[in-house]
Each structure stands twice: as structure tokens, then as C-alpha cells.
Image: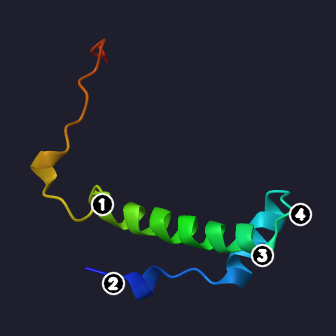
Amino acid sequence: MQTESDVAVSEGEAEAFARRIGLAWLTPAHTQRLCEAMSTIARAGLAVPRQSSKFVQPAFTFRVASRAHPSTS
């Protein structure tokens, strides 16, 4: 499991993100709060279970849909 330091967001990253989404009016206090929010969101994202790739799962896990109309050829 990753630690809090692994998901720390720098103020430069927060400022760059704010510029990308059009928030040019942020004060340093706002930027600091944005850093904290981005770190919290990143930690929450790490806790979300991920679906394994179909190349990792056993074949019987994946089902193929049957044909609606069987071909007569």
C-alpha cells in the first residue's frame, strides 16, 4: 500500500492544474487548499479496486455472448 508521501501534490502541480482548468485568480491559500484536496483525491483513487485485465484473468471468467440469429450457411 502506498503511503501519504507517495501521493503528495506540490504547489507547482496544483498551480499548473488550476491554470489548465481556468482558475487564474487563486490566492496562495487557495492553492494550498487545492494541494490538500488533490492529495486526498489521489489517496481515495488508490483505494478503488481495479478490474484485472482480461489477459490476467482465467478464461472462464469472461463469457462470450451467444448469437441472436444462428447463421444457416
39 or 66, nearer to the observer:
39
Q: Amino acid at mark 1?
A: Ser
Q: Residue furthest front?
A: 29
The vertical placement of 37 against 4, above or below, is above
Q: Residue 6 falls in which quadrant of the image?
A: bottom left
Pointer 3 or 2: first along the chain: 2
Q: Nearer the viewer, mark 4 or mark 3?
A: 3
Q: Residue furthest right?
A: 24
Q: Which residue is mark 4?
A: 24
6 or 51, nearer to the observer:
6
Q: Which residue is mark 3?
A: 28
Q: Amino acid at mark 2?
A: Thr
User: In the rendering, at what x and y percent does residue 27 appear?
Assistant: 82, 69
Q: Amino acid at mark 3?
A: Pro
Compared across the picture, whether 59 is left or right of 54 comes to left
Mark 3, secondary structure of its residue:
helix
Q: Which residue is mark 1?
A: 53
Quadrant placement of the C terminus? top left
46 or 18, nearer to the observer:
18
Mark 2, secondary structure of its residue:
loop
